[in-house]
Amino acid sequence: MKDLHNGRLYWPETLEDPHIYPSLTSNKATTVAIIGGGMSGCICGYVLAQSGIDVCIVERGDIAGGSTSANTGLLQFSNDIMLSELIEQIGEQDALLFYRACRDAVVQIGEIAARLEIDVAFIPRSSLYYASTEQDIPKLQKEYEALRSNGFDVEYWDADEIGARYPFRKPAAIITRGDAEINPYRFVRAITAAAAEQGAAIYEHTDVVTHVTTEKGKQHITTSTGHVLEAEHVIYAIGYEPEELRGQLVKANMNRTYAIATEPQHDLSPWKENMMIWETARPYFYMRTTPDGRVLAGGQDEELSEPVHSESERRKRTDKLHHRIKEHFPMFTGKLEYDWTAVFGESRDNLPFIGEDPKWPNVYYCLVYGGNGTVYSIIASQLLRNLICGEDHPIRHILRLDRPSLQNV
């Protein structure tokens, strides 16, 4: 099994006794087989089951046990690539379609969260996106104008306005309204349970070893125990580039990142509105609060495809994250309690890969690379449901695996 994270994770400790699902112990037939029981796979399973489609999710570990457990739970319509830059990359019409789809997805996550049986800590938030240096002000102003002129709810703050509200000063910032935060582990666990109630079959500890298409057009998935899952459609939602695609279609890089959660702080009042905070520098540093008063922060990304296994090496990076919290909020005294490192995928054109394999009919990929994976997963679930039902989707052409924007990267 690919090693996706290392360290002490915060989110799994917020849910006692998560439900255990069985392994696949016999042959089974289904309409849609989803390989991967993380955020993207389970959201897809939920949406398909809600639509009355017979669906099966197979996960070789535990549900929500991979990248989901290391997810920091920021839900933002802004992306790793600014709207102004995306306009230059793919054109204004498509860039706006994509950004608006992300904005709508945040709303849809809130609607789903309200229907789930357990509290997943979905809380609407605003984000403060600040210029890391004076040199970044022009591009921040350009981004503000692109967002404002196209109907996004944004404000622009100069250094004095930031300093009047927060105990730190930065050259400038964009405030985006319409974002949110969530507990990703509880969310995936709850949405999986809801999918199961709608008839989805969920199997943990079920490792897929082969996948072939029969002469009759059926997808035959064989597990390590020799059982066959027969499906009409297969969705790969495994969080990283599958062996079937490696080097052929998807241009993506695997990197590693670091995150921490402090002890509960005595007083979070200096953090106005509990805004999510991030910066223009790349790789970027970001922070948010948690419902129990912790500060959760991440960053220190490195272009390496394996998490750090040495605790001392990990702590060198995570101590820097803790120091950066104190740079922004010197009055915060809560000690670092959780720290981890995790692998994440990043596409070379800063967009996820969602759609059908152009050379393998009825095989689909839900590779939600980037810092906005939960938002992308909502988009993916609807897009793939439409494709499976023979319908189009307004941004299918933007995210397809052989899209034109990959030609120059």
Image (tube, rainbow, N blue to C red):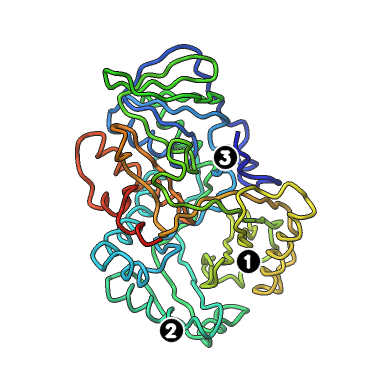
State the SS at label 2.
helix
In the rendered view, tell whether residue 77 sits above or below residue 191. Answer: below
Name which of mark 3 and mark 1 comes first in the sequence.
Answer: 3
Task: Compare residues 238 and 63 and report the one nearer the observer.
Answer: 238
Q: Nearer the viewer, residue 79 or 181?
A: 79
Q: Earlier in the sequence, mark 2 or mark 3?
A: 3
Q: Nearer the viewer, mark 1 or mark 2?
A: 2
Give the labeled residue for mark 3. 66
Q: Position of residue 81 (x, y in %)?
A: 42, 65
Q: Look at mark 1 in the image and give the residue it sits on.
A: 268
- Tell me how many marks there are: 3
Q: Which residue is mark 2?
A: 138
Name which residue type carries label 2. Pro
Q: Earlier in the sequence, mark 1 or mark 2?
A: 2
- Which residue is pictured at 67% across the width and 66% down the height? 267
- Judged left or right of residue 220, residue 292 is right
Mark 1 touching mark 2, by CB under 8 A? Answer: no
Vertically, is 210 above or below 291? Answer: above
- Residue 220 lies in what quarter of the image? top left
Q: CA distance from mark 3 to mark 1?
A: 30 Å
- The quarter of the picture where the N terminus appears is top right
Q: Residue furthest right?
A: 312
**Three-letter amino acid code at the position of disc 3:** Gly
SS at mark 1? loop
What's the amino acid at mark 1?
A: Leu
Q: Residue furthest left?
A: 391
